[in-house]
């Protein structure tokens, strides 16, 4: 494969060129935090960023999205779907977030393909970036095997110092650099530098799970009746922030907003959270997950077991955003490790009893 490079001092003119054809979205600083947002000037783009408050998922599955518009005035039945998917380049996606987008691509293109998501996805070209150090103290991507990517990007950047190496993942990605003169074929020195950076980066990331992630589904199966869920219930505020910041959560609610005369309006999709008590309330007022313990258990089972078993992909990509956001410090990696310790202790006790 041919290695291509792009000098960092050409990024600005590259972004300007792309802006003539696409909406360019990427990480930019807002006060003390970083967010994914439209890049109006190349100087706003911060490719060397820690993590963002909300994941890049919000560009593909907006927090509030108009699905249809309807008008019943004068006995008409006018109902139209609404699609808002301008050609977009999504810049600077970390590898964990790219794994989460791969999961969304799978889930939202199953039995009932989600037309709105798929239209946005098709119009979006993803430029991801190799993570060379942990983006936050809460990240555990190495343990979840999301610290690198081989596919699902259109173009992938690796920081080589004064230049980026470019890995083309699709025709859409190749199109982004096709007519940009500053892209060069990499030299022997570039190859050597890339190999060195890639081999050195792994030791910058700690393993934070005490066991192999492949054991997670069976560990959770054994932990359904763990007392940990009741203990966590006493701490959890049921605020739903953990779901809102998660790159791999996709549950939503649907609401209608009408005009005052109730003649016309729009139907919207809005993000929802399985940690809210009304989430599992169905007709007749029955709540099939009535306790916070059951809701917490469901969240971690979905992330660590159900998703892996149904799709073969991890449901949690180890970004650490939920742990960073949670006011009472509930963290997936702590919970998974605590369950592992409980099961290990139980096995030892059973072995001792048998001898
Ligand atoms: S785990 Fe933390 S962030 Fe999630 S609902 Fe409970 S208190 Fe809120
Ligand atoms: S569960 Fe937490 S750590 Fe895992 S992907 Fe979601 S926000 Fe990131």
Image: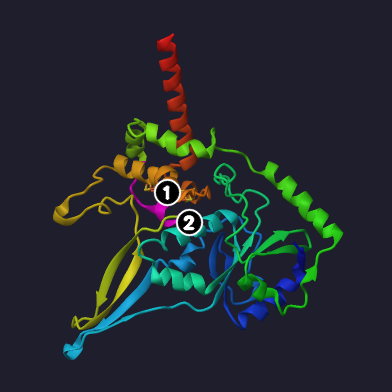
> Callout 1: helix, strand or loop?
helix
Q: Residues within 10 Å of mark 2 (few under 14, many from 20)?
A: many
Residue 336 counted in the magenta span: no
Residue 328 x/y as whole percent: 41, 43
Q: Nearer the viewer, residue 223 or 152?
A: 152
User: Which residue has dot 1 on it?
Assistant: 307
Task: Name which quarter of the figure residue 343 lies in.
Answer: top left
Q: Which residue is mark 2?
A: 103
**Is 245 included in the stretch rendered in magenta?**
yes
Name the residue nearer the viewer: 320 or 219.
219
Looking at this view, name the residue that lies furthest to the left. 284
Q: Position of residue 247 (x, y in %)?
A: 48, 56
Residue 296 placement (x, y as % from top left): 35, 43
The reply, left or right, for residue 242 in relation to residue 130 is left
Residues under numbered marks 2 and 1 in contact, where contact means CB atoms less than 8 Å apart = yes
User: How would you classify the magenta stretch by its main secondary structure?
Assistant: loop
Q: From the viewer's perspective, is residue 334 above or below residue 288?
A: above
Q: Residue at x 39, y 43 (%)?
A: 301
Q: Nearer the viewer, residue 207 or 306?
A: 306
- Name the residue located 26 percent from the left edge and 42 percent from the top edge: 291
Colour scheme of the picture: rainbow
State the extent of the magenta-drawn residues as a range.
Answer: 236-247
Residue at 40% x, 72% y is 116
Q: Extreme bottom residue here?
A: 74
């Amino acid at each position: 494969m041919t290695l291509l490079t792009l000098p960092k001092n050409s990024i600005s003119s590259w972004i300007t060129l792309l802006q003539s054809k696409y909406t360019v979205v990427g990480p930019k600083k807002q006060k003390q935090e970083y967010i994914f947002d439209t890049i109006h000037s190349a100087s706003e783009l911060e490719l060397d960023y820690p993590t963002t408050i909300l994941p890049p998922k919000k560009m593909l599955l907006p927090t509030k999205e108009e699905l249809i518009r309807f008008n019943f005035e004068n006995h008409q039945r006018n109902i139209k779907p609404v699609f808002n998917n301008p050609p977009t380049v999504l810049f600077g996606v970390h590898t964990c977030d790219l794994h989460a987008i791969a999961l969304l691509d799978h889930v939202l293109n199953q039995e009932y393909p989600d037309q709105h998501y798929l239209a946005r996805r098709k119009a979006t070209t993803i430029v991801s970036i190799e993570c060379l150090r942990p983006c936050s103290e809460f990240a555990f991507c190495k343990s979840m095997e999301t610290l690198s990517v081989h596919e699902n990007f259109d173009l992938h950047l690796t920081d080589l110092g004064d230049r980026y190496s470019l890995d083309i993942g699709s025709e859409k990605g190749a199109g982004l650099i096709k007519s940009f003169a500053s892209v060069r074929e990499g030299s022997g020195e570039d190859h050597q530098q890339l190999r060195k950076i890639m081999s050195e980066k792994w030791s910058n990331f700690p393993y934070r799970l005490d066991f192999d992630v492949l054991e997670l589904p069976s560990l959770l199966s054994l932990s359904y009746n763990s007392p940990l869920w009741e203990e966590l219930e006493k701490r959890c505020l049921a605020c739903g922030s953990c779901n809102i910041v998660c790159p791999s959560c996709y549950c939503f609610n649907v609401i209608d907003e009408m005009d005052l005369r109730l003649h016309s309006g729009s139907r919207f999709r809005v993000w929802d959270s399985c940690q809210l008590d009304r989430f599992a309330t169905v007709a007749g007022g029955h709540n099939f997950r009535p306790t916070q313990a059951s809701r917490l258990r469901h969240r971690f089972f979905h992330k660590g077991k159900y998703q892996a078993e149904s799709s073969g992909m991890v449901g949690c990509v180890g970004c650490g955003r939920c742990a960073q956001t949670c006011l009472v410090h509930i963290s997936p990696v702590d919970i998974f490790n605590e369950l592992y310790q409980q099961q290990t202790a139980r096995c030892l006790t059973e072995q001792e009893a048998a001898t």
